Amino acid sequence: MKKIMPYLALIAALGVAIPVAKKGTRWFAGTDAIASRLELVEERLDRKIDKDRMNELQERMWMSRGRWTNLFTEEKDRSPESMDELLLFMDEEDRDRYREDEEEYRELREKRKPKKEEEQE
């Protein structure tokens, strides 16, 4: 009985070690695929965040433009001829905020452009 025990222990160890090694090999081989999928998901999430921010900025600019166009029309009894004329009519704080939003919107739009060109190729 004592002579059989080491052999049984070896068989048991191999019985556990071989499936664990196979599973570990499959896991290790899958890490590149998982990493590439994760990278793709992160990229899509970043684009979605940028798009949501662009929508928020655009909506805020439209609301500001609409509010100040109405005030301009009430005071001057005509519509502004250009955005520059409307910006000059705005108070300084709203004008600065509008320009900052507009600049951030342009930067986000430029950031998104290369992504579209790469996808089309």
Image: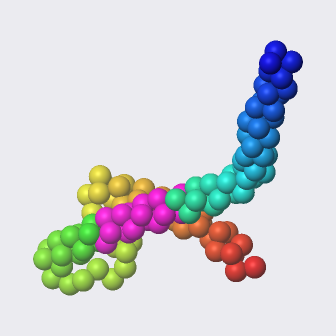
85 displayed left or right of 41: left
The quadrant of the rendering that contains the N terminus is top right
Looking at the picture, the colour scheme in use is rainbow
Is residue 60 highlighted in magenta? yes
Magenta span of residues: 46-62
Residue 111 lies, with reference to residue 5, above or below; the image says below
Residue 120 x, y percent position in the rendering: 70, 80
Residue 22 x, y percent position in the rendering: 78, 46
Q: Which residue lies at the image location 82% right of the left edge and 15% below the top edge?
A: 2
Residue 103 x, y percent position in the rendering: 48, 60
Is residue 7 highlighted in magenta? no
Q: Main secondary structure of the magenta part?
A: helix
Q: Which residue is more in the foreground, 20 or 67? A: 20
Residue 43 x, y percent position in the rendering: 60, 59
104 displayed left or right of 115: left
Q: Which residue is more in the foreground, 116 or 42? A: 42
